[in-house]
Image: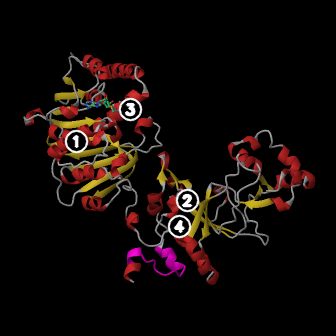
């Protein structure tokens, strides 16, 4: 009986919602019952299908089928393409029985059983050339001791994966599914990306590098709204069941969609063998092994001030004058970068930045009683903030609600959020000759004692350092920062501190930094 893929997908989604609704979150956690959203399932399926030769009939397998999101995607993607067989397993009758009924009359054969207890088909003709799966994500704490022993032995036998007892359940799924795939069949696994970095992931990574040909790992951007919580740090891992060719390169991508990722990079299997953590790909990779100086060795990097309410605490010159606020409580503060055209901020004799927009921060940590007594103008202004501003989260958590944190003017500030498509420079380093402090749209770079000493001897070196900072490759900075959708970049203080800085150290006349090993040898 022919089926309309869209209408059956609608029915499947309705069924999924209904079935999920009968379970508590805790029950669903136990068996990792979180369905794949339709669009994601379709993207994944289409990608996998394209990895198979066009004329090859599809033998599909989903060992954790649920209501069949991937099979449904196959129905909508495979128009005109022969589907020779389709097999699914589901342990929980709550999902399995209605799912079987939904797909009755289609090529999909669902078996209600624990996939990990099934013997792989001895006959190669029964195996799958397209395995797509969002396996149950169940942490090892929920697996009983004897269960782990059984799974570990089976994994070792079927795919030579020596999984540690700390492995998530999904690792066993991948290991055991090996026996269900045809030679050169393709697998796409939607799994948590933590295996890329943690110890228990070693065995899975060894399998991906040595037993099969790892094709592509795409990690989703957690800020992407299309995913619910269960999928936030997910990756799709693609491989072909055949030994890798020599000098094989693997594609790593991040953000956007699998077909159109925000960033992407080829990484050699050799580099992957050496790298302890894989989530640093596709961003800059050489840095993780860097033993020399990092920016954090040269500068203490702090986020600018969170005032509690910029509109209340930051005033322009006219407003400050009309309110008759005393100058001693007004500190110059930088406006947003929109108002700063040049990368160098000049100053007048009093330390005020020479900018068209001249702003002041109300900066007073004197107790209220003193202000009430001695500073009538400031007192009157503060009263206007009592009802709202003083009750804001930040202000009410301060001892004195209007007292700002100490943030001296920094000689170099960095704008840490920007769009790379603006002028190709997502970050700008500004040389701040003024005494203006800055808000948290900036990162503030204060020379560390080591560098401060050098600068005392050679003040001109600061300018060279600033120029060198602006010359740091975009890739290097982006390798450390996050990329948001729509080309937005953000750099946290820690991430900027992590950027290698040997050249900058040399500019400042600092000696080569010795690694602990070199020091030992010396
Ligand atoms: C993350 S859900 C994925 C469901 C569906 N394939 C999808 O992508 O929407 C995992 C499914 O595997 C089932 N499952 C859990 N343990 C299983 C096992 N040992 N064997 C077979 N299915 C299992 C769960 O009941 C759940 O329906």
According to the picture, the residue beneath numbered tag 1 turns out to be: 149
Query: Considering the numbered disc 4 on the image, is that residue within a helix, a strand or a loop?
Result: helix
Q: In which quarter of the image is the C terminus?
A: bottom left
* In this view, the mark in front (4 or 1): 1
Question: How many tags in the picture?
Answer: 4
For this rendering, which residue is in front, 377 or 33? 33
Q: Is mark 1 on a helix, strand or loop?
A: helix
- The answer to whether 31 appears left or right of 440 in the picture is left
- Whether pointer 3 and pointer 2 mark residues with C-beta atoms closer than 8 Å, the reply is no
**In the image, is the residue at mark 1 within 8 Å of ligand 1 by its beta carbon?**
no
Residue 226: tell me if it is visible: no
Ligand 1 within 8 Å, label 4 CB: no
Name the residue at the front extreme: 145
Please give the residue where the numbered disc 2 appears in the rendered image: 493
Q: In this view, does 138 lie above or below 83?
A: below
Residue for badge 4: 296
Residue 215 among magenta residues: no
- Residue plotted at (53% across, 82% down): 509
């Amino acid at each position: 009986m022919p089926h309309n893929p869209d209408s059956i997908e609608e029915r499947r989604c309705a069924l999924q919602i209904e079935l999920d609704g009968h379970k508590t979150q805790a029950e669903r956690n136990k068996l990792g019952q979180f369905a794949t959203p339709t669009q994601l399932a379709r993207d994944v399926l289409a990608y996998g299908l394209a990895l198979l030769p066009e004329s090859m009939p599809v033998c599909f397998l989903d060992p954790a089928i649920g209501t069949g999101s991937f099979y449904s995607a196959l129905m909508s993607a495979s128009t005109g393409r022969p589907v020779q067989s389709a097999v699914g397993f589901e342990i929980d009758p709550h999902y399995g029985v209605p799912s079987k009924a939904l797909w009755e009359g289609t090529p999909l054969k669902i078996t209600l059983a624990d996939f990990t207890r099934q013997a792989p088909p001895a006959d190669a003709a029964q195996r799958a050339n397209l395995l797509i799966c969002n396996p149950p994500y169940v942490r090892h704490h929920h697996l009983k001791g004897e269960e782990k022993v059984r799974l570990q032995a089976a994994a070792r036998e079927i795919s030579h994966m020596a999984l540690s007892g700390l492995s998530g359940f999904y690792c066993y799924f991948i290991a055991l599914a090996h026996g269900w795939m045809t030679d050169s069949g393709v697998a796409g696994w939607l799994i948590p990306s933590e295996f890329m970095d943690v110890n228990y992931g070693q065995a899975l990574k060894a399998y991906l590098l040595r037993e099969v040909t790892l094709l592509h790992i795409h990690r989703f951007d957690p800020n992407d709204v299309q995913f619910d919580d269960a999928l936030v740090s997910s990756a799709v891992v693609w491989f072909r069941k055949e030994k890798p060719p020599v000098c094989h390169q693997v594609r790593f991508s991040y953000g956007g969609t699998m077909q159109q990722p925000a960033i992407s990079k080829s990484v050699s299997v050799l580099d992957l063998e050496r790298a302890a953590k894989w989530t640093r790909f596709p961003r800059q990779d050489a840095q993780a092994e860097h033993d020399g100086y990092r920016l954090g060795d040269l500068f203490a990097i702090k986020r600018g001030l969170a005032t509690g309410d910029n509109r209340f605490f930051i005033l322009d010159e006219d407003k400050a004058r009309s309110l008759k606020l005393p100058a001693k409580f007004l500190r110059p503060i930088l406006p947003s970068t929109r108002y700063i055209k040049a990368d160098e901020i000049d100053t007048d004799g009093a330390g005020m930045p020479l900018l068209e927009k001249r702003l002041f921060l109300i900066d007073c940590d004197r107790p209220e009683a003193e202000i009430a007594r001695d500073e009538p103008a400031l007192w009157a202004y503060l009263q206007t903030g009592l009802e709202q501003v003083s009750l804001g989260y930040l202000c009410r958590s301060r001892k004195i609600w209007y007292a700002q944190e100490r943030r001296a003017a920094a000689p170099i500030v960095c704008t840490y959020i920007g769009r790379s498509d603006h002028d190709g420079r997502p970050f700008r380093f500004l040389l701040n000759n003024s005494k203006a402090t800055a808000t948290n749209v900036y990162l503030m770079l204060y020379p560390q004692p080591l560098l401060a000493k050098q600068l005392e001897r050679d003040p001109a070196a600061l300018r060279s350092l600033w120029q060198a900072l602006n010359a740091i490759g975009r890739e290097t900075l982006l390798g450390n920062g996050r990329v948001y959708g729509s080309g937005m970049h953000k750099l946290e203080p820690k991430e900027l501190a992590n950027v290698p800085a040997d050249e900058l150290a040399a500019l400042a006349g600092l000696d080569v930094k010795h690694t602990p090993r070199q020091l030992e040898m010396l």
